[in-house]
Image (cartoon, grey):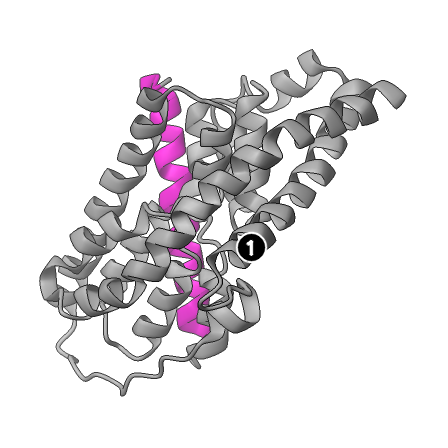
Amino acid sequence: MTEVLIDTLVDGIKLLPFLFIAYLIMEYIEHKTSNKSKEIIKKSGRFGPAIGGILGIFPQCGFSAIASNLYAGRIITLGTLIAIFLSTSDEMLPILISEAVPISIILKILGIKLIIGIIAGFIIDLVIRLTSKNKSQDEERIGEICEHEHCHCEEGSILKSSLKHSISIFVYILIITFILNTVIHIVGEEALSNLILNNWLLGPIIAGLVGLIPNCASSVILTQLYLGNVITLATMLSGLLVGAGVGLLILFRVNKNIKENAKIAILLYFIGVLAGITMQFIGIR
């Protein structure tokens, strides 16, 4: 156990400066583009799933939360919301960057999430247009939920926001890595791999459930498992497709229709798991 603790601390400390640099860059981008992103997505119309999917791949602080607010106010369509949720990369991207994962693999992961998000979004919107004649819209109810209650990003202080994010994810990584290392030490890598890695059906189902955790913990868990060769790329993507950061949590708060929210969560889970199983079946590595 002493070895496990030392390994966990060493691995975590090595990641910290890279996490800070990654978040510093992304906080700068977010502060400069978040308002523009809102305006673009509001005016996107039928092209919403494509634009939302593209914007969603950038791990902006709470962009999925912004999307939830826009959907609750019926500013964007359900397809656009789902496209954003599916493409959103949350904490996966900074972790992959900090671990020096080859850029080709990172682009492949982001590309898969983007394509699935856009396709699913367009199909959902098409089905809704063909089956529903009710096109009434509610008034917009956009607040500052993400920034002030969940992400704790401080406007005008990029360094503070970056440091907060880095430390928060650093703590997550320490805790999760320690738990994973302990489980692997007790159970054994081979037994754990046989349970998840080599099970093309069970892996995506479990990963999808992990992805439903409404914060960055799910993406941290799944990415760390993938980097540790415990789960496959397809299994990781199952969970990451389902995981939408605080998006679902915000949706349940701002959208009063609880049944609708539950259906959206189930739909998101179904798409993520189905995509993961399909990728396992066709052998995407």
The residue carrying mark 1 is 215
Vertical placement of residue 157 versus 164, above or below:
below
Residue visible at 24% across and 56% down? 52
* Residue type, numbered disc 1: Asn
Residue visible at 53% across and 62% down? 151
Please name the predominant secondary structure of the magenta segment in the image.
helix
Dividing the picture into quadrants, the one containing residue 110 is: top left
Q: Does the magenta portion include 281? A: yes
Q: Is residue 110 visible?
A: yes
Residue visible at 50% across and 76% down? 253
Vertical placement of residue 264 versus 56, above or below:
below
Q: Magenta region: which residues?
A: 258-284
Vertical placement of residue 73 versus 49, above or below:
below
Q: Which residue occupies the foreground of this view, 175 or 23?
A: 23
Horizontally, residue 217 falls left or right of residue 237, namely right
Mark 1 nearby-residue class (10 Å; few <14, some 14–19, many ≥20): many
Horizontally, residue 200 falls left or right of residue 83, namely right
Q: Which residue occupies the foreground of this view, 109 or 91?
A: 91
Q: Which residue occupies the foreground of this view, 258 or 236?
A: 236
Residue furthest right in the image: 2
- The quadrant the C terminus occupies is top left
Residue visible at 45% across and 30% down? 97
Q: Does the magenta portion include 82? A: no
Horizontally, residue 96 falls left or right of residue 78, namely right
Q: Is residue 239 visible?
A: no
